[in-house]
Image (cartoon, rainbow, N blue to C red):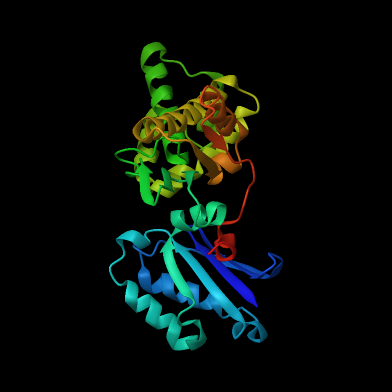
């Protein structure tokens, strides 16, 4: 028997088919798009990904867990179920679709209590504690998303502009950042920033990751992101006054040691908050449910 997990993000869709023992027997991925942006293209991409599963496995899949970015706000949920069942009737009664954040939580904690710190393009603190769903943050890039890739880039640029206003000069790391973007000055930077979509801004965090290897001023921005995420966890701790385990997920935390180290350092005086060190694919939620 097999279990199927699919993680649908705004950048890519990832599919992993497991034996019930946890061994991976098939995996694939294709281009992602947020379901709220273009649901027809999203469905097309998802069905194309499902079509890559070898036919020999299909009738033996007992549990299918799909996590979708934006699912909580999507109106036509039943339509997607019916589109999938029309092609894969054996999936009926075995398929559960949820938000991408819930898929991550389930992969780490299954039906047990636990909290996820998710920091990628955006950020959110999310979990289940004492049979209640809890959330801190996750209000989007205009109202929050502290510690996310978008927030890191925005914070760095705000400091760059403030420094330039004060001195009419750029630090070496700031000038290097502009050169990476092929920009000549701060006015070009402002115009360029406002021309980008949210995800495009967040992708510029990769430039800062490279600069952090050489410039401690850039490291400080990543450390501040970790502190911001820790503050949200401590807000949760104050609210519930219960011990809990916390796992970390998203590109900012998995690909950047500065952020995660700063976050964990802020939690050292709170032993009732227990970090989970393991890294688990969201697709593994199908093994836990």
| Count of marks placed on residues | 0
Residue at image coords 59%, 79%: 61
Nearest to the observer: residue 233 or residue 12: 233
Q: Give left or right: position of 176 versus 129.
A: right
Q: Residue furthest top?
A: 167
- Counting from the top left corner in percent of width and height, residue 285 is at 55, 61
Position of the N terminus by quadrant: bottom right
Q: Is residue 34 above or below residue 195?
A: below
Q: Give left or right: position of 254 versus 134.
A: right
The answer, for residue 87, to whether it is visible in the render is: yes
Q: Is residue 22 above or below residue 239?
A: below
Q: Give left or right: position of 94 versus 192.
A: right
Residue at image coords 53%, 26%: 223
- Counting from the top left corner in percent of width and height, residue 9 is at 48, 59
- Counting from the top left corner in percent of width and height, residue 21 is at 70, 67
Q: Is residue 49 above or below residue 186?
A: below
The quarter of the picture where residue 26 lies is bottom right
Residue at image coords 41%, 72%: 41
Nearest to the observer: residue 169 or residue 280: 280
The answer, for residue 123, to whether it is visible in the render is: no
Residue at image coords 56%, 52%: 108
- Counting from the top left corner in percent of width and height, residue 44 is at 45, 76
């Amino acid at each position: 028997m097999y279990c199927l997990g699919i993680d649908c993000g705004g950048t890519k869709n990832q599919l992993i088919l497991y034996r019930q023992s946890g061994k991976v027997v098939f995996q694939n991925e294709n281009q992602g798009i947020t379901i709220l942006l273009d649901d027809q293209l999203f469905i097309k991409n998802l069905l194309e990904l499902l079509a890559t599963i070898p036919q020999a496995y299909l009738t033996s899949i007992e549990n299918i867990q799909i996590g979708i970015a934006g699912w909580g706000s999507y109106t036509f949920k039943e339509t997607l179920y019916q589109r999938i069942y029309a092609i894969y009737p054996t999936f009926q009664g075995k398929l559960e679709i949820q938000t991408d954040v819930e898929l991550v939580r389930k992969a780490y904690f299954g039906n047990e209590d636990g909290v996820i710190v998710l920091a990628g393009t955006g950020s959110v603190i999310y979990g289940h504690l004492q049979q209640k769903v809890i959330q801190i943050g996750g209000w989007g890039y205009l109202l929050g998303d502290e510690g996310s890739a978008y927030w890191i880039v925005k914070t760095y640029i705000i400091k760059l502009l403030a420094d330039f206003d004060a001195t009419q000069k750029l630090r070496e790391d700031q000038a290097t950042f502009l050169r990476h973007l092929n920009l000549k000055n701060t006015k070009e930077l402002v115009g360029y920033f406002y021309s980008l979509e949210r995800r495009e801004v967040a992708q510029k965090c990769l430039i800062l990751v490279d600069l952090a290897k050489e410039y401690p001023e850039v490291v400080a921005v990543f450390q501040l992101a970790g502190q911001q995420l820790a503050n949200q966890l401590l807000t949760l701790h104050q609210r519930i006054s219960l011990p809990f385990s916390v796992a970390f997920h998203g590109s900012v935390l998995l690909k950047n040691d500065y952020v995660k180290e700063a976050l964990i350092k802020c939690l050292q005086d709170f032993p009732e908050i227990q970090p989970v060190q393991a890294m688990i694919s969201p697709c593994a939620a199908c093994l836990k449910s």
